[in-house]
Image (tube, rainbow, N blue to C red):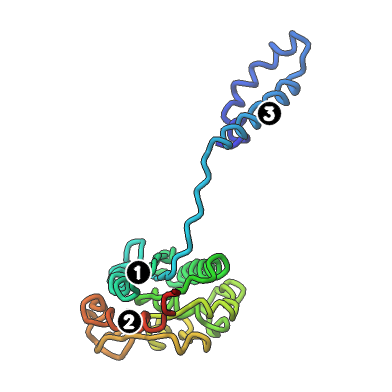
């Protein structure tokens, strides 16, 4: 509770004191000033007792993953399988996981929230943990989000009602040095993106050589296929292992 909240809560109690205070020849504003000082001082003392959270050490590797449409908050099923597959491939290096915070809903413009959250986190990690190597990933809508994050420019053909100023700016070029690999599962094709009124996904030049895009045979989201079950099978069809091998091969050897 902040000091202003304290006064808001106790306002009805202070008002009846006006007549009593005037009897003693003290103006109410003097009492209010006194209470203000008392409340702020007490609040400061209370805050002094709150222990500050110790800074978490920077991991050797961090996976930043955006889940697919309709999956609950977290990295999603495909993302978790990928993390589980990558873990034994990096030896005894430490690894952290950051699930991109966005709705992952069928309200497609909210994907901007994911682009903004992922890009902001990646930039912050590059600045605060310069030795950490990041592996970016995404599944389905999350793959689109992460693909846009790597873009070198704001894409043309934005949906109606969204201006270029609404779209997060591309990450600074030097951030790419902190990204070891980009792994995308079931990335929506240009046809699908056009159907939902979104611009095509273009991987930025600085990330192309370190990106793998996996599309299951007959997956209608990333290809011209018609098997919708294929789009949900990345956690079981071996492509997660393929992506983990790719990411591990692009991670720098552990420092001696």
Image quadrant assignment for residue 250: bottom left
Which residue occupies the foreground of this view, 60 or 173? 60
Residue pointed to by mark 3: 36
Q: Distance between the residues labelled 3 and 2?
A: 59 Å
Image quadrant assignment for residue 76: bottom left
**If you read the primary sequence from the N terminus, does the residue marked by circle 2 or circle 1 appear first?**
1
Q: Distance between the residues labelled 2 and 1?
A: 19 Å
Quarter in which the N terminus is drawn:
top right
Classify mark 1: residues with Cα within 10 Å, few (<14), some (14-19) or many (20+): few
**If you read the primary sequence from the N terminus, does the residue marked by circle 3 or circle 2 appear first?**
3
Q: Which of marks 3 and 2 is in front?
A: 2
Residue at image position (60%, 77%) is: 172
State the mark number for residue 92.
1
Q: Can residue 208 be seen in this view?
A: yes
Residue at image position (42%, 70%) is: 61
Residue 234 percent across, percent down from the top left: 26, 78
Residue pointed to by mark 2: 243
Q: Is mark 1 on a helix, strand or loop?
A: loop
Residue at image position (77%, 14%) is: 26
Q: Which of marks 2 and 1 is in front?
A: 1
Residue 110 percent across, percent down from the top left: 46, 68
Classify mark 3: residues with Cα within 10 Å, few (<14), some (14-19) or many (20+): some
Q: Is residue 119 visible?
A: no
Q: Which of marks 1 and 3 is in front?
A: 1
């Amino acid at each position: 509770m902040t000091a202003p909240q304290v006064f808001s809560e106790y306002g009805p109690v202070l008002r009846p004191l006006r007549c009593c205070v005037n009897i003693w020849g003290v103006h109410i504003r003097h009492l209010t000033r006194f209470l203000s000082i008392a409340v702020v001082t007490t609040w400061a003392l209370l805050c002094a007792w709150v222990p500050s959270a110790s800074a978490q050490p920077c991991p050797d590797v961090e996976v930043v993953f955006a889940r697919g449409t309709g999956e609950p908050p977290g990295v999603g099923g495909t993302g978790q399988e990928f993390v589980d597959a990558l873990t034994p491939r990096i030896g005894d290096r430490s690894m952290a996981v950051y699930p991109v915070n966005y709705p992952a809903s069928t309200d497609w413009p909210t994907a901007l929230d994911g682009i903004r959250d992922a890009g902001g986190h990646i930039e912050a990690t590059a600045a605060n943990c310069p030795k950490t190597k990041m592996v970016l990933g995404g599944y389905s809508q999350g793959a689109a989000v992460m693909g846009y994050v790597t873009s070198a420019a704001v894409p043309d053909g934005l949906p109606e009602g969204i201006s270029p100023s609404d779209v997060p700016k591309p990450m600074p070029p030097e951030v790419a040095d902190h990204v070891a690999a980009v792994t995308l599962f079931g990335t929506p094709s240009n046809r699908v993106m056009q159907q939902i009124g979104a611009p095509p996904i273009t991987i930025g030049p600085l990330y192309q050589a370190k990106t793998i895009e996996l599309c299951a045979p007959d997956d209608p989201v990333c290809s011209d296929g018609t098997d919708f079950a294929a789009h949900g099978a990345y956690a079981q069809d071996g492509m997660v292992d393929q992506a983990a091998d790719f990411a591990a091969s692009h991670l720098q050897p552990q420092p001696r």
